[in-house]
Image: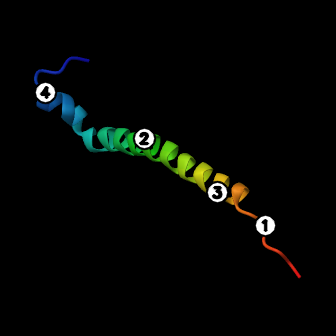
Amino acid sequence: MSWGSPAEFFAMGGYGLYVWGAYAVCLAAMLVEPWLARRQRHQALIDVTREPEQST
């Protein structure tokens, strides 16, 4: 495919919103997933190191 200008490239033949939207959602997922995993790991380590409560 050949585009005559950057505007045509970003328009993607009328499907630019869907194409670039898909890229944005994928990028967001790739950025959020490691952050959530790190947060969950941190919470798990806190739970493991916390002393168990005494049940009487």
- Image quarter where the C terminus lies is bottom right
Q: Nearer the viewer, mark 2 or mark 1?
A: 1
Residue position marked by numbered label 3 in the rendering: 46
Q: CA distance from mark 4 to mark 2?
A: 22 Å
In the picture as drawn, the residue positioned furthest to the bottom comes out as 56
Residue position for label 4: 6
Q: CA–CA distance between discs 2 and 1?
A: 40 Å
Whichever of callouts 1 and 3 sits on the residue coming sooner in the sequence is 3
Identify the residue at horizontal 23%, vertical 33% (top origin): 13
**Callout 3 amino acid:** Ile
Residue type, label 2: Cys
Kind of element beneath mark 3: helix
Measure the C-alpha gap from mark 2 to mark 3: 31 Å
Of circles 4 and 2, the one toward us is 2
x, y (%) of residue 45?
Answer: 66, 52
Mark 1 or mark 4, which has the lower sequence index? 4
Question: Residue 7 appears in which quarter of the rendering?
Answer: top left
Q: CA distance from mark 1 to mark 3?
A: 12 Å
Q: Are marks 1 and 4 in contact (CB under 8 Å)?
A: no
Q: Are marks 1 and 3 in contact (CB under 8 Å)?
A: no
Number of residues whose C-alpha sits closer than 10 Å to that of mark 1, classed few (under 14), some (14–19) or many (20 or more): few
Residue most extreme to the top: 2
Question: In terms of secondary structure, where does tag 1 sit?
Answer: loop
> Which residue appears at 59% of the width and 51% of the height?
42
Q: Amino acid at mark 4?
A: Pro
Name the mark nearer the viewer: 1 or 4: 1
Task: Work out whether residue 7 or residue 13 is closer to the camera in this orientation and state it.
Answer: 7
Tell me whether circle 4 and circle 3 mark residues in contact (CB < 8 Å). no
Location of mark 1 (residue):
52
* Residue placed under numbered mark 2 in the picture: 26
In three-dimensional space, the C-alpha distance between marks 4 and 3, rounded to whole angstroms, equals 50 Å
Q: Name which of mark 2 and mark 3 comes first in the sequence.
A: 2
